[in-house]
């Protein structure tokens, strides 16, 4: 559950919800009441700094009593697929902002393009973006501010941005090593939305690792994204993702020999792939093994058997991104644009968790946990 869900439910903009959460002016009493009702109905509780042992203190520094802005691109306004990652990023950024005595505000590029700047709050000192497809006219409003790209690396045109990302290459390498280690000799990558840089990074690393191991790898990607893998295409694939997934599934069924080890680049796509394979008479767990990514609870819940998936550590990405921004504002980070890769965490389904630990030796993509352990850790919050 994220601030985007609340905005959809209340029929208002993300930035309006953010103003209500942060108790800023510029929102009518009626709209504020509507937003609070939506929050109550959805059970949404704004992220707050996690409780820690001992007294809570704020760091004095360049972000104290200032504002930082998380700016969402069009994909995150339209798609439910990223909501889980967004909620974890939001919580991590909120924790980091609180440590520095700053206020986190959230808005979207579409809103920023049509709204006038609000000068009734603290000064905005840093900008965080997830989707790089933000119009230059919007970015110009924040010229001179440090910008940190989250989750995926910045495209060529934004090489001056810092980036705090999940290590997508580690996901691809680990997934390939897992499937090869399980005895699969015919492998496949299912990536219906190849214009997303994160998915492309995972798929590319998977193919490279599998090929180095001497395995045949089939690549099935959507044809609707004409710009290709690494261009960070402006094509929005959300509207036709279902049709693209169906086309990819048909292509998979036509492969000979048919792959038995399949890496799907996101849990949301994996859910559709399970359904389409079932309609074709194939059973995941019997006829093929699937590995996925994102640790998206909603997408994974109906899948039987659960696939091995990867927690991208979005909470930690949010916290580390705030540290990078604070260092930029303070002038203590003088290097050119930096990229921080946060290691993903493989999350084992029950069937794999029962296997011997020998299989997992040498597969390095962060500590390996079971789904129950991951859920328990998430409910406890961070341990620092």
Image: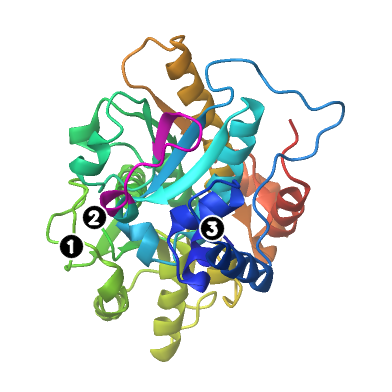
Say whether residue 114 is magenta: yes
Instruction: Please state, as top left, top right, bottom left or bottom right, where the C terminus lies in the image.
Output: top right
Instruction: Compare residues 142 and 280 and report the one nearer the observer.
Output: 142
> From the viewer's perspective, is the residue at label 1 or at label 3 nearer?
3
Q: Are marks 1 and 2 in contact (CB under 8 Å)?
A: yes
380 vs 188, nearest the viewer: 380
**Against 183, is 344 above or below?**
above
> Looking at the rendering, which quadrant does residue 315 occupy?
top right
Residue at disc 2, secondary structure:
loop
Instruction: Point out residue 171 in the picture as x, y percentages from the top left corner.
Output: 45, 46
Which stretch did the figure color magenta? 112-128
Q: Nearer the viewer, residue 114 or 213?
A: 114
Q: Residues within 10 Å of mark 3 (few under 14, many from 20)?
A: many
- Please check the rendered image and state whether residue 347 is part of the magenta-colored stretch, yes or no: no
| Label located before the other in sequence (1 or 3) | 3
Separation (CA) of disc 1 from disc 3? 29 Å
Name which of mark 2 and mark 3 comes first in the sequence: 3
Element type at mark 1: loop
Label located before the other in sequence (1 or 2):
2
Residue nearer the viewer, 153 or 32 = 32
Of tags 2 and 3, the one toward the viewer is 3
Q: Which residue is mark 1?
A: 225
**Badges 1 and 3: C-beta atoms under 8 Å apart?**
no
- Residue drawn 35% across the image and 26% down it: 145
As drawn, the label of residue 237 is: none
Question: How far apart in space, not on screen, are marks 2 and 3 (Cα)?
Answer: 26 Å
Question: Is residue 362 visible to the viewer in this orientation of the structure?
Answer: no
Which residue is disc 3 drawn over?
3
| Residue 231 locus on image (x, y percent) | 17, 46
Counting from the top left corner in percent of width and height, residue 308 is at 56, 59
């Amino acid at each position: 559950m994220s601030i985007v869900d609340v905005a959809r439910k209340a029929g208002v903009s993300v930035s309006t919800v953010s103003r209500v959460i942060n108790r800023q002016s510029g929102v009518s009493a009626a709209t504020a009441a509507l937003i609070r009702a939506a929050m109550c109905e959805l059970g949404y509780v704004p992220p707050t700094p996690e409780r820690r042992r001992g007294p809570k203190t704020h760091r004095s520094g360049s972000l104290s009593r200032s504002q930082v802005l998380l700016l969402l691109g069009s994909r995150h306004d339209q798609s439910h697929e990223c909501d889980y990652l967004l909620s974890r990023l939001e919580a991590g950024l909120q924790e980091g902002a609180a440590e520095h005595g700053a206020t986190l505000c959230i808005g979207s590029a579409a809103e920023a393009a049509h709204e006038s700047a609000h000068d009734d709050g603290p000064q905005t000192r840093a900008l965080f973006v997830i989707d790089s497809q933000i119009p230059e006219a919007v970015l110009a409003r924040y010229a001179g501010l440090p910008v940190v790209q989250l989750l995926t690396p910045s495209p060529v045109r934004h090489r001056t941005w810092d980036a705090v990302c999940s290590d997508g290459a580690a996901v691809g390498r680990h997934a390939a090593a897992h499937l090869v280690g399980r005895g699969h000799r015919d492998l496949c990558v299912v990536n219906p939305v190849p214009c997303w840089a994160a998915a492309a990074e995972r798929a590319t690393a998977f193919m490279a690792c599998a090929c180095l191991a001497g395995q045949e790898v089939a690549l099935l990607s959507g044809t609707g994204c004409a710009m290709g893998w690494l261009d960070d295409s402006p094509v929005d694939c959300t509207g036709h993702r279902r049709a693209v997934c169906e086309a990819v599934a048909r292509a998979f069924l036509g492969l000979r020999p048919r792959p038995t080890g399949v890496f799907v680049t996101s849990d949301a796509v994996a859910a559709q792939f399970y359904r389409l394979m079932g309609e074709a008479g194939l059973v995941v767990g019997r006829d093929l093994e699937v590995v996925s990514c994102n640790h998206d609870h909603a997408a994974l819940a109906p899948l039987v058997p659960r696939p091995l998936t990867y927690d991208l550590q979005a909470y930690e990405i949010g916290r580390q991104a705030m540290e990078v921004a604070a260092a930029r504002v303070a002038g203590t980070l003088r290097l050119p644009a930096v990229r921080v890769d946060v290691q993903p965490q493989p999350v084992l389904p029950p069937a794999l968790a029962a296997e011997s630990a020998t299989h997992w030796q040498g597969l390095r993509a962060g500590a390996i946990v079971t789904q129950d352990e991951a859920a328990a850790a998430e409910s406890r919050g961070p341990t620092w």
